Image: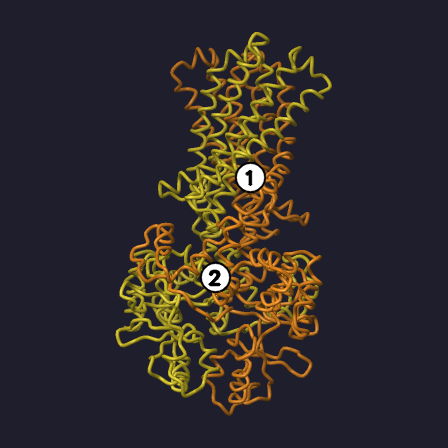
Chain colours: A yellow, B orange
Amino acid sequence: MEDNQNQDLNKNSDSPENSEENIHMLKEVPENELINLATSWTALPFGERRQKFAALPRTEAEDLFLSLTVHDQAELISEFAALEKRSWVRLLAPDDVADIIQELGIDSREEILSLLDPQTRREVTALLAYAEDNAGGLMSSRYARLRPEMTVDEAISYLRIQAKTQVETIYYAYVLDNNQVLLGVASFRELFAANPTKLVRDIMKADVIKIPVNLDQEQIGRIFSQQNLMALPVINDDGQMQGIVTFDDVSSAIQEETTEDIQKLGAVETLDAPYLKVSLFELIRKRAGWLGILFIGEMFTASAMGFFQSEIERAVVLALFIPLIISSGGNSGSQASTLIIRAMALGEVRTRDWWRVLSRELLSGIALGTFLGTLGIIRIMLWPNKESQYGPHYFYVALTVAISILGVVLWGTICGSMLPFVLKRLDLDPATASAPGVATIVDVTGLVIYFTVASVVLKGLIL
Amino acid sequence: MEDNQNQDLNKNSDSPENSEENIHMLKEVPENELINLATSWTALPFGERRQKFAALPRTEAEDLFLSLTVHDQAELISEFAALEKRSWVRLLAPDDVADIIQELGIDSREEILSLLDPQTRREVTALLAYAEDNAGGLMSSRYARLRPEMTVDEAISYLRIQAKTQVETIYYAYVLDNNQVLLGVASFRELFAANPTKLVRDIMKADVIKIPVNLDQEQIGRIFSQQNLMALPVINDDGQMQGIVTFDDVSSAIQEETTEDIQKLGAVETLDAPYLKVSLFELIRKRAGWLGILFIGEMFTASAMGFFQSEIERAVVLALFIPLIISSGGNSGSQASTLIIRAMALGEVRTRDWWRVLSRELLSGIALGTFLGTLGIIRIMLWPNKESQYGPHYFYVALTVAISILGVVLWGTICGSMLPFVLKRLDLDPATASAPGVATIVDVTGLVIYFTVASVVLKGLIL
């Protein structure tokens, strides 16, 4: 994390009821120009960004650059002239440079690496060996280290030296043996409060939470949120210290994953950039894929209805309730899948909990289906011109609708809640069970449920 | 943030390809019992939680207790006998106690406050004056403070004393004048690296990012993610220091807000606890509300279809494509609303960007509608028994379907993208424009579009 706090966000924002208003108000305060630029960066049109960046004094441009996301940093770097690139790349910590290379793609690798000093180049190359989304890919190799045999006083002086060089945080100091094996951790605060003549070995905590280099970011995020730590040490299979992952690295990674999950839930292929920055062509392409697949799925509704065409011909009244019935199933399915997918992402529900979820959803589906079915029957029975609209057998029509709704809602709830488990078992992302996807599955089967119920209840009456 | 790192998460987890497998594997390692208990806490049945907690040695129970969410802590506290409560409540920092009181409800206020020492009681009472979701409600009053006229050496000694007492972080020390007005900030690291005889006034940074007590958590989260800071000072209108908000406070707040947004997107009233911990009755109640409202909205489809009953009687073929057409509109509307709601939550799109969004969505809607309409026409024209199923005028039926799909998709895209802006303008949460809600609006209007197109294209043919 950066140590600098160099803008005033407040000054005269008295009562920021409305956050957006508040940002506007902040905009008027000249001292806030830099932070406002950072805040509105993603929303600015591309040309304007480039121009505003060029207009800033060097130090302010550096502060802004450091505060941008990897995506925005990479975009700027790819814009700079070859000679200019070096100083911008060298501003960054090794893990950030590795992220930039991963963002710009493999073609940029040699060019960017050539801009670095040999020591940093080695560090970045090592980091590039890890996937972006696990501990190895998130970690920084610039952590504060101590030897077990130092005294507290020596340790503090040693950290004082390290504080002047590029370590990411001095808040935790890691105690390593000669083979780089992690022995323990001493927080700065503990060193401070300790007797200066004691040995680091005696005040360090030996039972450290360590994470393996290949642990994925979702799980790292959960450990952070449960443990309230600011940094975690990353070790290899031999227990050797590889680097640290800090809270903010994971936090932005988790935010990205959540955005992906939400976009998948809405049946959009993950956008790689903010909405307004994705090109229109890309935006359409990312949506057309799922929309096409769902459309082809929905075509089965036309085929299914074809089978029941003669029923509709004999009893057109049946057609009137088709949208109501299939959408009830779709909506209850969307609710169930949304709840389960989020609970899975937060680690509240695990694969082996499927049975508990199913039993809850069965009961929920019956209760919700009965509730909506009753609403449906009331709607038809209380309709002023029910006899002229729905015919002399309107009661049986109402009964058909109510039973179908119960069946469809129950079925939607089961599909919506179980599909994420099925996907997870198949090693796919549960979020792929998007709400529209569940709705499509339920639409087709909902029609079959409806016409089957109708053929039983209305047999000999209007069918 | 807590300083203690006291569990080993790794030891023998060599290749955790699958995160869930990995958790299971960790479970076998006896040293990890405590962290495993913390990790699986929300998933355990209530009776088991209580029992496992009671079985732990006191210090381990304390570690576990401190690592739990406010919700879980409050649940445990409400379970404890009156005499037992005090030591558990006193374990917590003032801001956490305030959260517990807010979680347990106003009735618990006096009881919990009576358990505290007078100093902490004053701090908690002050914190309770703020809403849970703004800076005042999130802040901690236990920050490290310095006077501007101290030397660096004096400052370090003074922080050494503060480090032994309850300050939340000593990483940033805030420099206050005699009236508690915030003058600047000095990071620990800077003090450390500075010449010991210099004055704090001369090394502190005076242009600090300050946040007002009533800034809401969403905006605080954005500042944190842009600035890479670990803590931010909170001030009142007079510039007096009120407390600090740390990164982890906001991070869990943001996570909660995201969960709320996702649940709203799925048309579920926000659950106040993890899925498996919400009582079945509550779970059904929270879903029934929106499901009922959407159902009543969908009833208009039955009414709308009533108007077109004679058209359906004359041309039953029209009924076959109703589900396909309305769901195409619903799906494209869900995509648009999901994208916009998430972009708004991340601050990528602001109210004043509505025109840019509309112009993008107009073009996206036309492109996606043309794509799906073409798929629809191909589906009908290539159907083997198209003449027997769709009649001699099957080409005009196909044309009707294709034009309707274009219209409905365009309309769905516009509704889905603009509804979040309308809600925001009305000071409502944009996430209330749930995907199912947008789909319901589009369903009703989609039918009108379809039958209007049909009445024009098929006039004199089959209508």
Residue farthest toward the bottom in the current orientation of the protein:
B197
- The residue shown at (63%, 77%) is B182
Subunit bearing disc 2: B
Using the image as rendered, state which of residue B273 and residue A83 is in the foreground: B273
Using the image as rendered, state which of residue A7 and residue B122 is in the foreground: B122
**Badge 1 is on which residue?**
B435
Q: Position of residue B7 (x, y in %)?
A: 40, 65
Disc 2 element? loop
Q: Is residue B44 above or below residue B92?
A: above
Q: Position of residue A434 (x, y in %)?
A: 47, 39
Using the image as rendered, state which of residue A338 and residue B49 is in the foreground: B49
- Which numbered mark, 2 or 1, is in the foreground of this view? 2
How crowded is the residue under tag 1: few (<14 C-alpha within 10 Å), some, or many (20+)? Answer: many
| Quadrant location, the C terminus of chain B | top right
**Badge 2 is on which residue?**
B56
Left or right of residue A310: residue A123: left
Left or right of residue B362: residue A177: left
Q: Which amino acid is tagged 2?
A: Leu
Q: Of the two numbered discs 2 and 1 on the same chain, state the one appearing first in sequence.
A: 2
Q: Which amino acid is tagged 1?
A: Ala
Q: Is residue A126 above or below residue A284?
A: below
Q: Quadrant of residue B285?
A: top right
Say whether residue B437 is visible.
Answer: yes
